[in-house]
Amino acid sequence: MFNVKDFPSKNLQTKQKRVFRTIRLSLIPACNFSCVYCKTENSFNKKYLIRKPVFFINIIQNLKQYIQIQKIHLTGGEPTLYPYLAEIVQKLKELKIPEVSITTNGTLLKSKFNQLYFAGLDSINLSLDAVEDYVLKRMGTKKRFSFYEDIIQIIRNHNINLKINTTVLRGYNHHQILDLLEYFGKRKIVVRFLEYMKMGVSEKLHQERFFGQKEILELIQTKYTIFELPREPHSTSKYWITNEGYQFGIIANHSDPFCYDCDRLRIDSNGNLYGCITQKQGIPFSEKNSEEILNKLLQYKQNFFVGSNNFMYELGG
Ligand code: SAM
Ligand code: SF4
């Protein structure tokens, strides 16, 4: 647990009371998958640097003077491809970050799991778009569903918080929503359905493949009676529960935006800072001017998500 004294006495905020509390840190802009909504043939061919943990830890340590950091999500690209993942988790826990989590496609999790567990990882968001193998393949996944079942068992045996992220595309996997809900509901695991965001390469496909919150709820209600749960402040998801006790969430960036109280600050794998996922260019971190930069970044926060040319694998979702 954390102490109040570990937090800075001030937390930067705008007149509209916008603050940063959650950091999404993209460790590496590379990935071993080709999810249809995220990647193009050429999009991962760029050269990139792999930064050592000290590079990111210095940034976090500095930002801690101005931000009450509650949570750091490590993401990518694919964060399990980052060679020092466990080391960075351990260092963040040493800095007393209350919650350190990863968002991952899961492929390399088995081999890295013990290291991550002992480093103090708090939670895992596992991206999984279907229960049927042919649909997984169509979404760009290289693994079969049985592979995920094994990982999920390992995670659960270790009492690490687990959520499933499913990005929903009309005609690709929307018909898997009920199966996913039943499979995970029975196992008391929360599945979150993500609206397909108009980001980078996904823009062209977006119009024809978008399957929004309203349609997701209508589909679920063909089989289940559902109740909406109170929304946690700053949460990207709204949650519902079925009569059977199956809990699920929807992240509705487009149709039900949560931008008005978004508390995320994003850092890419080169140490550029983004106040909003739609910000055109990141601002390079600078130790001398970090307070000024953070104030500027708060001004970039939007009230609605309108799409962006940024790539998801660079900003990490
Ligand atoms: N590679 C990791 C993974 O897939 O979990 C982390 C990076 S990925 C960019 C983070 C999350 O963003 C994943 O859950 C993925 O499904 C989601 N995502 C990627 N592109 C998206 C899009 N265009 N719309 C909505 N979600 C998207
Ligand atoms: Fe890779 Fe994640 Fe993008 Fe899929 S969503 S291509 S796993 S970065």
Image (cartoon, rainbow, N blue to C red):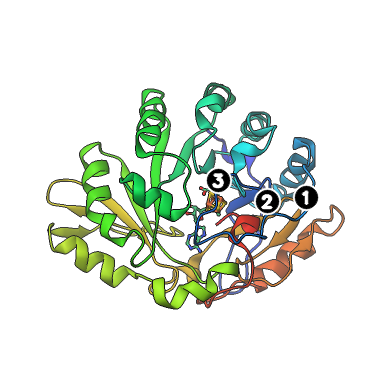
| Above or below 251: residue 118 | above
Q: Residue at point 57% right, 75% down?
A: 302
Q: Do tag 2 and tag 1 residues touch (Cβ < 8 Å)?
A: yes
Q: Residue 71 — which label? A: 3
Pointer 2: what residue? 29
Mark count = 3
Q: Is mark 1 within 8 Å of ligand 2?
A: no
Q: Is mark 3 within 8 Å of ligand 1?
A: no
Q: Is mark 2 within 8 Å of ligand 2?
A: no
- Of discs 3 and 2, which sits in the foreground? 2
Q: Position of residue 53 (x, y in %)?
A: 75, 36
Q: Residue 26 — which label? A: none
Helix or strand or loop: what does disc 1 sit on? loop
The amino acid sitting under disc 2 is Pro
The crowding category of the residue bearing disc 3, from other C-alpha atoms within 10 Å (few below 14, some 14 to 19, many at least 20), is some
- Of discs 1 and 3, which sits in the foreground? 1
Say which label, 3 or 2, has the lower sequence index.
2
Query: In 3D space, how far apart are the residues under numbered discs 3 and 2 (Cα atoms)?
Result: 21 Å
Q: Which image quadrant for residue 173?
A: bottom left
Q: Position of residue 251 (x, y in %)?
A: 40, 61
Pointer 1: what residue? 48
Left or right: residue 251 compared with residue 218: right
Say which label, 1 or 3, has the lower sequence index.
1
Helix or strand or loop: what does disc 3 sit on? strand
Left or right: residue 135 compared with residue 123: left
Q: Which image quadrant for residue 161?
A: top left
Helix or strand or loop: what does disc 2 sit on? loop
Query: In 3D space, how far apart are the residues under numbered discs 1 and 3 (Cα atoms)?
Result: 26 Å
